[in-house]
Amino acid sequence: MKHAKILSAAALITLMGASVAAQAYEADWKRGRVYYRSVCTSCHVAMPVGSINPSTKTKAEWSVYLQADKHAKDKDTVSKYVSKAYRASIKSGNKAAEKFADTPEKELMEDIKAFLIKGAKDGDAPATCS
């Protein structure tokens, strides 16, 4: 009887741990890099501001920028450019937008953030978008 209670408790703890692990999303900086370079950079290059390399800001600056969700001098939001609607609107001319068409917005934003933090001027691997 005592042995059964211990096994039951162990099974419950295992199930609870699996549930928490299933809910946590581990950002994929490589997927974020593909999207950022293919979508964000391609648009910025066509604009007067030019491309914006991840290494132009620190990790803290990128975090504040993404948290504020302000883009183009507050004319719109960063999340707009990660939305499924935006990706659908450009997918015919952008392979990355087409490839990630069904990726949940929160996951894609976390992926981009992971890339920007990793590539920040004080990140693990300061990156350019060449």
Image (cartoon, grey):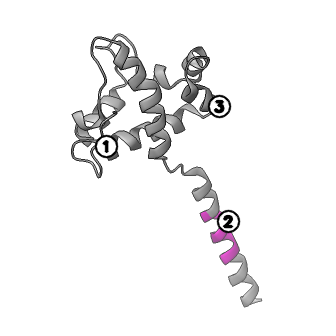
Badge number at residue 119 = 1
Q: Amino acid at mark 2?
A: Leu
Give the x, y percent position of residue 127: 30, 41
Q: Nearer the viewer, residue 98 or 79?
A: 98
Distance CA(mark 1)–CA(mark 3): 25 Å
- Tell me which label, 2 or 3, sits earlier in the chain: 2
Q: Which residues are magenta?
A: 10-17
The vertical placement of 113 against 14, above or below, is above
Tell whether 98 sits left or right of 108: right
Distance CA(mark 2)–CA(mark 3): 29 Å
Tell whether 96 sits left or right of 57: right
Please tell me how crowded label 2 is: few (under 14), some (14-19), or many (20+) other residues with Cα within 10 Å: few
- Answer with the quarter of the image where residue 15 lies: bottom right
Give the x, y percent position of residue 115: 39, 42
Badge number at residue 78 = none
Tell whether 30 sits left or right of 3: left
Helix, strand, or loop for circle 3? loop
Query: Which residue occupies 62% across, 17% down?
Result: 92
Task: Give the quarter of the figure containing the N terminus.
Answer: bottom right
Please tell me how crowded label 3 is: few (under 14), some (14-19), or many (20+) other residues with Cα within 10 Å: few
To which residue does mark 2 refer? 15
Q: Nearer the viewer, residue 129 or 55?
A: 129
Task: Give the quarter of the figure containing the C terminus.
Answer: top left
Q: Main secondary structure of the magenta part?
A: helix
Helix, strand, or loop for circle 1? helix
In magenta segment, residue 45: no
Distance CA(mark 1)–CA(mark 2): 36 Å
Badge number at residue 102 = 3
Q: Amino acid at mark 1?
A: Gly
